[in-house]
Image (cartoon, rainbow, N blue to C red):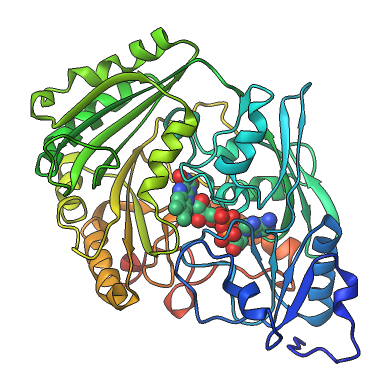
Amino acid sequence: MASDTIGASEDINSRFSGHFYLRGEAGYEDARVGRIWHANKPDRYPAAVLMAESEDDLVNGVRLAREKGWSIAVRSGGHSFPVWSVRDSGLLIDLGGFKELSYDPETQIVSATTSVKGGDELNPYLKQFGRYFAAGGCPSVGLGGFLLQGGMGWNFRGWGYSCEQVFAVDLVTADGELIRADDTQNTDLFWAARGVGPGFCGLIVRFHLKTRPITDGVAVSMQAYPVERYADVLQWLWDQHPHISDKVYFNAVSARPPIPVPGHDGGLVFMIWACAFCDTQEEAAAALEPLKTCPYRDEAILVSDAQPTTLPEQLSLVDQLHPQGLYYKVDSAWVDGPQPDIIQAMKTLVIDRQAEDIGYTFLIFRLPRPDDAPEIAMDLGTDLCVGAYIIHEADSASDKLRNWLRDAMGELEPYTVGQNWGDSDQTFREVKCLTDASWARFQKIRAARDPDGVFHSHLAGEGGFQNRNGWEAKD
Ligand SMILES: Cc1cc2nc3c(=O)[nH]c(=O)nc-3n(C[C@H](O)[C@H](O)[C@H](O)COP(=O)(O)OP(=O)(O)OC[C@H]3O[C@@H](n4cnc5c(N)ncnc54)[C@H](O)[C@@H]3O)c2cc1C
């Protein structure tokens, strides 16, 4: 039986090195929403919040929740757009004050707690060892949410989901036991920790991650076109995609350019951004060479070929596209079907963005996974993801922009297989993030590992539905 009250005689705080706040206490509100990175603050209220600071806090937090009959929600970096960490009732365990990093030069594995930020903290730490990890484009995203939902990091196109580089995870189970999951033990949880997203049935303490060497051959090519020319340029890029080296990570975006474009009025452009991850600059230039063959290049308003660059330089560009503290609405679609039809169906998203919105539409490509790629939970298997970030200052525009986004994404529904957890909000539009087989497999794991629902399951869509394409259900 869940109880949201604790007797005054109970000195809960003495169980933790971090601070425990009961709803109604001073400090509760800041603990509930203060670490959310953007302006989306939900009207959902946990019974209590634990600002954890140590491994013991995590174990004791889970044990306390069991005692009280509370369900647990977790926060690491605080970036989730629908704010999965803030749920009604139960205990929110916030891991922001629990940061540990260590590196083993022999195995080249880095161990990191989950609130460590991939770009801002993990990679600066790894630099001293000449290594890096394929963290997300936005440097402040926490490893916890990022890796659990798959993680589209550097060179996602060629290297796949960042969670494929997870070697092992340490976690607290629903029974309050600290265990390790890897290829040889607790393999069900190891599979699930690589992609089931924000309904994982355990509290991850730390990830053990394979790292890559920092090389001298990182270079970037960019081309920007008038946004109205997106269809031809995109069709060309999509045709080329299977033939371009797997060392080249490229995306296309419809955005206000994050760099000065001479003569441009500041409105949307359609940009190709391609970054090669090679050993030498010569190799990178050769890998980027196919980008030069775009037949519409003479219409481009900006062209820059194979410029040597670094990840911090590229991160600062990505950072400019994501101002902190504003309202965000996101949606995405892994698409499959006739390419010209899909390209037409994204026209509203690419060209007709609303005046209040300073966000962008992105197209992320991926190559087929090699046969020896690890088995992970997240994988919808198509080669193009269309996503939209709506970013705005005034909450008063929220309803209008949400509806615009739903209608614009709706045009892609005939071709939509599913979406990314990280770019989804199931409370607003129901789109599956896992294949039916992966979802069914996870439900069995959850039933076996957490039969009492100690951990909150995924935030459901209308009517409590999870992992379904809403428009198919209505057919
Ligand atoms: C500006 C911006 C840019 C982004 N760019 C990218 C990108 O390039 N690639 C990409 O893949 N994603 C990207 N994302 C999406 C991002 O990866 C997800 O929102 C992710 O959930 C954020 O992780 P977090 O730890 O910061 O979030 P949080 O809100 O702290 O966590 C999200 C959820 O993950 C689960 N979780 C987190 N930690 C744990 C844990 N220790 N144990 C159990 N469950 C846990 C919980 O359910 C939690 O509520 C971006 C997001 C933003 C805001």
Write the residue at 12% across / 35% down: 232
Q: Nearer the viewer, residue 41 or 187?
A: 41
Q: In the rendered view, does 167 fall on the left or right side of 307?
A: right
Q: Is residue 157 above or below residue 97?
A: above
Tell me where residue 55 sits by quadrant. Answer: bottom right
Which of the 4 image quarters holds residue 204? bottom right
Residue sitting at x 47%, y 26%: 310
For the C terminus, which image quadrant? bottom left
The quadrant holding residue 271 is top left
- Quadrant where the N terminus sits is bottom right
The answer to whether 191 is drawn above or below residue 80 in the figure is above
Number of numbered discs on residues: 0
Q: Position of residue 292 (x, y in %)?
A: 21, 18
Report x, y in % for residue 95.
70, 60
Nearer-the-camera pick, 192 or 440? 192
Q: Is residue 3 visible?
A: yes
Most distant residue in the top direction: 282
Q: Is residue 308 above or below residue 235?
A: above
Closer to the camera, 35 or 427?
35
Judge by depth and name the residue closer to the eye, 460 or 55.
Answer: 55
Q: Quadrant of ligand 1?
A: bottom right
Q: Position of residue 295 (x, y in %)?
A: 11, 22
Rendering coords of residue 47 (x, y %): 69, 83
Residue 375 in view in this figure: no
Report whether 45 appears left or right of 390. Answer: right
Which residue is found at the position 50% from the left and 42% from the top?
Answer: 136
Give the answer, above or below, for where 290 lies relative to 339.
above
Residue 458 in the figure: left or right of residue 417 = right
